Amino acid sequence: MKINFRNQSRLGEFAITTLIKIAGYSAILFVGMIFLFLMLEGLPATRQVSLDSLLSDRWYPIEDYFGVLPLLGGSLLITLGATLIAVPFGIGTAVYLSEIAPRWLREILKPLVEVLGGLPSVVLGFLGILVLSPYLRVLLDLPTGLSALTGAVLLGGIAIPTVVSVAEDALDAVPKSYRDASLAMGATEWQTIWRVTLPAARSGVLTAIMLGVGRAIGETMTVMMVTGNAPIVPKGLGDLFSPVRTMTATIAAEMGEVANGSVHYHVLFLIGIILFLISLVVNVTASAVVFRSKKSQDRILS
Amino acid sequence: MKSRWLAVLFSFLILITISSCGNSSAQNEPASQVVGNIENKGSDTIVNLALAWAEEYQTIHPEIRLSVTGGGSGTGIAALINGTVDIANASRQIKEEERENALANGSEPVEFVIARDAIAVIVHLDNPVDHLTLQQISDIYSGKLTNWSQVGGEDRPIVRLSRETNSGTHVYFLEEVIRLGEKGNTTLFSRDTLLLPSSEGITAEIRQNPNAIGYDGLGYVTEEMKVLGIASADGEEFVFPSQETVNSGAYPIARDLYMYTNGQPDGVVAAYLSWILSPEAQAIVSELGFVPVQQ
């Protein structure tokens, strides 16, 4: 009986570890397969369209203009704008929640921030069209409120909950003894936050920023609704006030109509590859930063 | 996007109504009464009209199931070529490459003109400009004219609004207005033209922005925006879009609306299409602000 029981539990153990292993490896497998699929569908575009025309500044696919620079520029500009908004607000909120707010307020605020993160982006898009874009047009005397700025503000709003959530967890994980030591040395509360707590939570805060950036660059629905989708190459931060077209909005708007296997179809997949590579770079940078700072921390502690 | 969501919502509603119709008739008659299934997809311009037709047709012929969805002319024709729909709605004629694709797939698209539509050029209610010539509209959209004062309005920048490139209306406007219908004319939309994904996006911006100019099917125009009179050339009379001016040919930017089938239709699809061209169904066309096809 005993041996039988043991055998059974071993069998169960084996089955469960195998299942977990499969689940773990499947993520790698899926990413690999998605990348392969993107490559197969997107790379033909580099043969069908010359590099010159891919790097030109006009995107008008129904007349075979396939310049991706306006789309790339549009995505980067909006992501940059969103980061400029999300980082100070997000980290500020995280510091307030973790270091300053009384416990009861924090218990209320943190779930609220997370609810904000769960808002469907199409709802934010409606808010953008009906409220934010008319408001910004009148406030800043712009020709139209459907601009990169409106997109950046909304994307910033979308990224803030991600930044807050991750950064707050990182700040929370800093041992209380660090703060106590700093305060005991006569540092003020602000000096403690700025010189001790934030640097100690550096890697988590950087991860928060990177995740926020990743969230912003992949967002589609909101930007498609509020940025005006005009394919102009942005020349600087001043172009935040004019309309732009992003890579994600282009794929979403045009994928439905392309004939399977046409040049336009392959170019849209090529844009998908560019997006994939960008988010890969963002993620790798994030984990490299975390890895490096962990190592230096270990050195300090040892 | 709103119109597309609405289209999806409406098609669900219709499916629900049909299935409830089916249930009620199933109590009296056997369920095998449902003899036909028609899938209908395409142009967002036509979707409301196609839905109204489908509703009406189902009250007369409860044995037919019809489902209608939007998505754009290109989307509908692509679905027809892939064989997933019976009828594609299009606000433009099928392109040569699309026809070739269909032939390669072993089917020949057959065209039916099912209604006519005027493209209204619209501006904000406070815009003092009342009319433009076709040449002026072309110059505005190609980027030659950039300020309303150049066409007799206030000193304001012109913000150009257009539908996305998958819209049949976009293609029609490019060929017949911006290029003035001339073959070999390769003028393009100015780069800073806003490409909005839905009719609703255009009307929302026109309602609140006095700098904006846009275009849309006459069926989408409401009281909250101003329709411009259009002259086909300098010195010609300015004509406002209406059923009369479209049918008399006086209004210069009007087009046919199409349905396409895979090969000559037969059975239920043929019966439905011939009903659509009947006076009874064409009456619905004028109710929705489109122009009936003349018999």
Image (tube, rainbow, N blue to C red):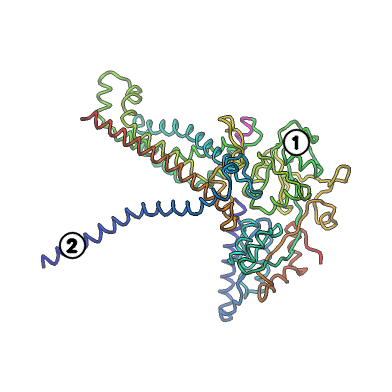
Pointer 1 chain:
B
The image position of residue B89, as x and y in percent, is 67, 61
Name the residue: 66% across, 76% down.
B267
**What residue sits 63% from the left and 41% below the top?**
A58
Q: Residues within 10 Å of mark 1 (few under 14, many from 20)?
A: some
Instruction: Name the residue tied to disc 1.
Output: B145
Q: Which residues are magenta?
A: A134-140
**Residue type for callout 2:** Ser
Left or right for A98, reference B214 = left
Residue flagged by tag 1: what amino acid is it? Leu
- The chain letter for the residue carrying disc 2 is A
Decide: few, some or many residues near mark 2? Use Cα within 10 Å; few <14, some 14-19, many ≥20: few
Disc 2 on helix, strand or loop? helix
Q: How many marks?
A: 2
In terms of depth relative to the viewer, which is nearer, A139 or A240?
A240
What is the quadrant of the C terminus of chain A in the image?
top left
**Rendering quarter of residue B95:** bottom right
Q: Is residue B267 visible?
A: yes
Where is mark 2, residue-wise?
A: A9
Q: Could you say where residue A168 lies in the image, as x and y percent from the top left?
A: 36, 36
Q: Nearer the viewer, residue B243 or B23?
A: B243
Q: CA distance from mark 2 to mark 1?
A: 80 Å
> Residue A59 placed where, x, y %?
62, 44
The chief SS type of the magenta part is: helix
